[in-house]
Image: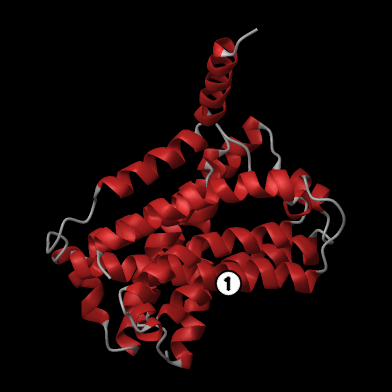
Amino acid sequence: MNSKKANWAFLITIISYFVMVIMIGMFFPFVADSLVLGNLVCEAVVVLPVLIFALASKEKLTSFLGFHKIKFRAVLMIGLFTFLSMPVLSLLNLFTQFWVKNEIADTLNTQQGNIPFALMYLSVGIIAPVFEEAACRGAYYHSYRKSGSAFKAMILSAIIFALVHMNFNQAAYALVMGMFAVLLVEATGSLWASVLYHGFINGSQVILLYGVLGGSADAYGDEMAVSPELLMCAVGVYVILTAVTLPLAWAVLMWIGRVEGKSHILSDIWTKRKQKKDKMVTLPFLLAVAICLVVMTGLIGHILEQFIQFVLMRLPS
């Protein structure tokens, strides 16, 4: 499977997402009211198109996606890397809130009833990481990797990972998180590294919600809702934390690479970034990106409103 097929899979994923939203709104409203069911459907939409393309290309999924063994020491260090990379992700999350809302807090505030911890952790901390990593760091990244440099493949797969969240708040830190996940995959030679990294991040948020805030969506929303002044202070604090922890995170990443015998690969990602085999960005990719941006900026509502008005004006009175 190459980049051209990956780009078509991305476009079909975005189109499928809108079909899914319309179908749920019309026929299955109970899915929209359930965070767990809604999340499961969204994850299926993200992973199925690209896996179908991979199977149609006669790829052996386990080896193509990169599910290989990693050493236990590396697993422990991935946990440390996760901890050290969290400040920069939190910084981006806070920074976007000067312009947009905290999407996770807003989603939790719309949910009705309490979700059991085990079910929430299964949905957010296990299913989401496995499905999204299989798609983005598995199928998409390795497809782009076949067509060009690891650096370009990393950027493109991270862009897809960011855009499938369909909001600017999550997209900002998902973009950086996606690049970190690729570096872990290259440092270990296994997709399990990015699955663990993603799972540690998502799982920590579930533990925060239930362990510290007692599973209260309102409490989580209150915790995340801060004034502009306090937000500015928080950004300043996280800038300092990021300056300290990010170099340490890179050192841990290099250590993981040495343990797995792949330390040279990390430097190769940058030095061989201009390597090119096939055209990596094609029209389907650009169309998918454009659709996502139209939705994320809210223009889709305005466009639909104008279209409906245009149709109504043409109807016979």
Where does the image place residue 136, in percent across and percent down from the top left?
Answer: 42, 65
Indicate the quadrant where residue 34 lies.
Answer: bottom right
Where does the image place residue 35, in percent across and percent down from the top left?
Answer: 73, 57
Where does the image place residue 74, in percent across and percent down from the top left?
Answer: 44, 86
Count of marks overlaid on the render: 1
Report if residue 271 is visible in the image: yes
Q: Quadrant of the C terminus?
A: top right
Residue sitting at x 50%, y 60%: 46
Image: 311 above or below 288: above
Residue bearing the label numbered 1: 200
Residue sitting at x 75%, y 46%: 221
Residue sitting at x 84%, y 51%: 112
Indicate the quadrant where residue 199 lies.
Answer: bottom right
Image: 288 above or below 85: above
Q: Secondary structure at mark 1?
A: helix
Where does the image place residue 129, in percent across and percent down from the top left?
Answer: 55, 69
Residue sitting at x 63%, y 70%: 125
